[in-house]
Every structure is written in C-alpha cells, then in structure tokens.
Amino acid sequence: MAALLDTARWLDASPGNREAAAEVLASAAYVNTGVELLRACLLPRRGDWPALRFFGEGAACFPWLSDGMWFLTQQRRWGLLAADPDYRSVAAQVNHVDLYREAAQLAGVALPDTAMRSSILIDGRVWDGSDPAAYARAFTIHDLR
C-alpha cells in the first residue's frame, strides 16, 4: 500500500510521469492496449493540470469511512440490503483505515485527524455520515422494502 501511495504521488508530480506510466501500462505485459487510450485517461485534455488526481497530498487515496458508509446507503436505497446495517462498522471492516495509516506513515503521507468527512454531492445534498439510515430513506426515488 505504501508503494501505491508513492506511485500516486509520482503520477501527480508531472504530465511526463503520466506519459511514462501510459507507455508502460499499455504494453503486453500489463494492459495490452493502445497507448493513446491510456494517455486519454491519465493526461489532462484541456491543459488543466492535474484534472485527475491520484494523490492530492494523500487525500485522494484516503479510505474515508464516510465514503464507505455512503456506498452502503446506496445499496440500502436500491434494495440491495434488506435492512440497515451498522454502517460505520461495515465500512471500517471494508476500508481498513488502520492499514492505510500504517502505509501512509511509511510513505510519509500526511493523515487527516478523522476518517469521517462532509461532502456536497452532485445532487446538492450534504453527506456527513451522521445518520446514514435516514439519508438512505430521504430519496423520493428508491427501492426500499
């Protein structure tokens, strides 16, 4: 995991690094595809560097418990979970923040003080993980049973 953090930091450091990664990954030993396809995914299209962040000072890779909990709310919302789970406990079992913290220390990556964050999502709703069961039920469109 520390090596992945180092790689993410390297990818964000320059467009040249992403170009080099595209060439290596396109080879038959890895993805076996045209380098143009990977360049289109890794490099900015309009000069807005970096459009896609892999590292973002460590924040892009952090396994936020609140993000894991949000995914569970969507599984509940769409009927994939028959009942509300212990959202925080399940997210902790999946995200392994403890392992990430160990790897981040090895890689010299700064860590947030908490594994929870607040986000404004594409629909304008605020997600902060404070009441995941109510959040899952708050949507007009759902498949709750």
Image (spheres, rainbow, N blue to C red):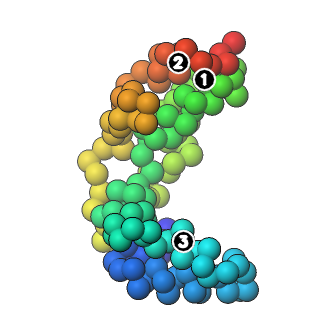
Where on the picture, by quarter, is residue 38?
A: bottom right
Q: Earlier in the sequence, mark 2 or mark 3?
A: 3
Q: Is 32 left or right of 77, judged from the image as shown?
A: right
- The residue to which callout 1 is attached is 77
- The residue to which callout 2 is attached is 139
The amino acid marked with disc number 3 is Ala
Q: Which mark is residue 40?
A: 3
Residue ranking furthest to the front: 46
Q: Earlier in the sequence, mark 3 or mark 1?
A: 3
Q: Which mark is residue 100?
A: none
For the point 28% across and 51% down, the residue is: 112
Q: Is 10 left or right of 39, judged from the image as shown?
A: left
Q: Earlier in the sequence, mark 1 or mark 2?
A: 1
Q: Is residue 30 above or below residue 142?
A: below
Are the two marked residues, 2 and 3, in contact with CB atoms closer than 8 angstroms? no
Are the two marked residues, 1 and 2, in contact with CB atoms closer than 8 angstroms? yes
Location of the C terminus (image quadrant): top right
Percent from the top left, x then y, of residue 63? 45, 51
The residues tagged by marks 3 and 1 sit, at their Cα atoms, a distance apart of: 34 Å
Where on the picture, by quarter, is residue 35?
A: bottom right
SS category of the residue bearing label 2: loop
